[in-house]
Amino acid sequence: MTSVAEPGGPTWLATSLTDPLVKPMLRELGHEYSTRYGKDAHYELSHYPTEEFEPPHGALLLLLEGGEPVAGGAFRRYDATTAELKRIWTHSAHRRRGLARRVVLELERVAVERGYHRVYLTTGPRQPEARGLYLSTGYTPLFDTAADPETIGPLPFEKRLPPLLPLSSPSSPPSPRASSPRAPSAPPAPVAVAAEPPVPAPTATAVERKV
């Protein structure tokens, strides 16, 4: 397991399905699926091998607050360039805080690091909040959004991921440049003017320009 703390609060934990911290996710997802679709959700939650959600091709992330999971999600390899999102979950006591959106964006970030260029997913026709989440985070529906979802079945979405930009080393700040001192100009020839001495030559100065 690896964890990364966000500044000022929650912690991202990369773990596996065998971690006891994942049990609340699986329990609530199972209840949600069974309640909405009237059937046992055990098959949906167990028919993918555990290792499909582990590196190098998969990932399972939990968002922890005070050491307890409040949201999470996973992805698995769909094909050589595509990750499939699964198990997007927000704890029932922490909804309407935008946590699912944070989970999706963090999974996308990790997928890019793993070399994926595209994300694919499906959600059920009786989960309008999930449909709204994916539409609001830039996913393209691969179905007729005007059709009755019940006539479609699982609703597929996809999203193209941005390329992973290489980390650039901090560039050295430009050093101040001073302009070259101007060569002294020749004094003007004295002009005879009654009762006035010749005008003295200007003194040469170096001018510095800050950049």
Image (cartoon, rainbow, N blue to C red):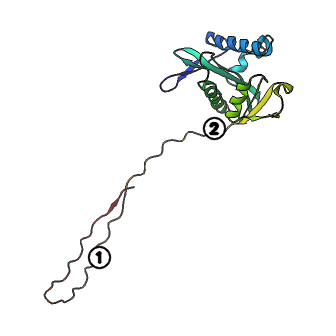
Above or below residue 84? Residue 46 is above
Q: Secondary structure under badge 1?
A: loop
The residue labelled by disc 2 is 164
For image coordinates 56% across by 39% down, the residue present is 167
Q: Residue 9, percent across and down? A: 50, 22
In the picture, which quadrant includes the N terminus? top right
- Position of residue 39 in the picture relative to residue 115 (left or right): right
Q: What crowding class fits label 2: few (fewer than 14 Cα within 10 Å), some (14-19), or many (20 or more)?
A: some
Tell me the quarter of the picture where residue 166 sits. top right
Tell me the quarter of the picture where residue 142 sits. top right
Q: Residue 199, percent across and down? A: 20, 80
Can residue 140 be seen here? The reply is yes
In the image as oriented, which residue stretches furthest toward the right?
151
Q: Earlier in the sequence, mark 1 or mark 2?
A: 2
The residue labelled by disc 1 is 185
Kind of residue at badge 2: Leu
Q: Which mark is residue 53?
A: none
Q: CA distance from mark 1 to mark 2?
A: 58 Å
Q: Residue 133, percent across and down? A: 68, 29
For image coordinates 63% across by 16% down, the residue present is 92
- Position of residue 146 in the picture relative to residue 168 (left or right): right
Above or below residue 157? Residue 28 is above
Can residue 59 be seen here? The reply is no
In the image, which is nearer the foreground, mark 1 or mark 2?
2
In the picture, which quadrant includes the C terminus? bottom left
Q: Secondary structure under badge 2?
A: loop
Kind of residue at badge 1: Ser
- Position of residue 11 in the picture relative to residue 157 (left or right): left
In the image as oriented, which residue stretches furthest toward the left?
195
